[in-house]
Image: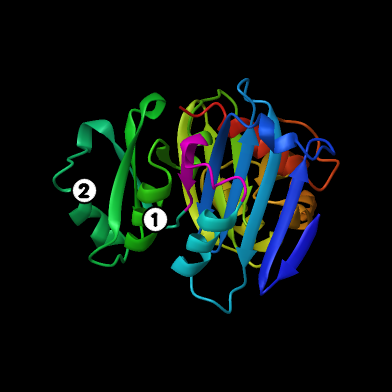
Amino acid sequence: MGTEYQNIYRQVYNVREDEHLLSETDNVTCVLTRRGLLAAAYTANNELLSIHYAAYGKERPVWELDFFEQLFAQEPLLIRQDKITKVFFLTSSNMIVPEELYDAAEARNWFDQIHFSELNDTVEHYKLNKEQAYYIYSIPHGINELVKINCRNAAVMPLPTYQLSGKTNQTSIQCFLTCEQACVTIYNNNKLLWHRVFDYTGAEDIAYEIRLICKEHKLNADKLTIACDTMSAAEYAAANALSQYFAAITDGTQQMIKGLWQPTLSFVKQLTTCA
């Protein structure tokens, strides 16, 4: 279900029709992107109950504080602050530093040489244990304070954590889509080959970036399967369109995509495995 009200687009997915469904909520995971927010409610056994998604258009600035403040104040899944256990951020301002090179005191200086950030923006780091590296990313000051106030018991992580938590001996391409950004991670021969969060307007933009990297590293893109997850059902068309450029498209759990919500359901399922 998707609706638009006051220039805010909303979608809701419930596992079943039940007016008392949300009373079963044990924990909530929250995902913040620069113009959208997803909240997923789970039972004590991490079984999904409901997904609530809200976003606004490009006519408004990124990370608009009023939008996020209103959601934390009014969204049914976010009102019970004690139930919010995980918060994920997606931002194109990021870098991965090998553990042996990481210096916490110098991290901000390194970061500012690559990305623009406001003086009061928070630069966070997250240890990628399996990669033996640190993921460094920035959060706008106002958004960071809002999360501190409303998600006091939550673990805060970069969204790509779920893509960077495992290795494979084969070539693996994982893609996550919001309405305007793609987060792509490529593994090859058990090693992280490439990771980037970038803007796109259509599937061809995503395919171009991936095929360019494949060409540089002598990988046959025509034979590759892309595992693609989405922020909401609205990105299904873009995910499905990627099939024009690669051998096959699956969701992040390697299942063939057959419905609008499937790539999002795959996404929220994988988030439960992130510590």
**What is the CA distance from the residue labelled 2 to the residue labelled 1?**
24 Å
Q: Is residue 224 something that shows in the picture? A: no
Q: In this view, does 241 lie to the left or right of 8?
A: right
The picture places residue 209, in percent across and down from the top left corner, at: 58, 56
Vertical comparison of 69 with 227: above or below: below
Q: Quadrant of residue 96?
A: top left
Residue, x 41% and y 24% (percent of image)? 130
Magenta-colored span: 76-90
Is residue 251 on the magenta stretch? no
Residue sitting nearer the eye, 216 or 187: 187
Residue for point 45% across, 57% down: 92
Nearer the camera: disc 2 or disc 1: 1
Could you tell me the amino acid type at mark 2?
Ala
Classify 61 as above or below 82. below
The residue lying toward the viewer, choosing from 194 and 77, is 77
- The residue under label 1 is 146
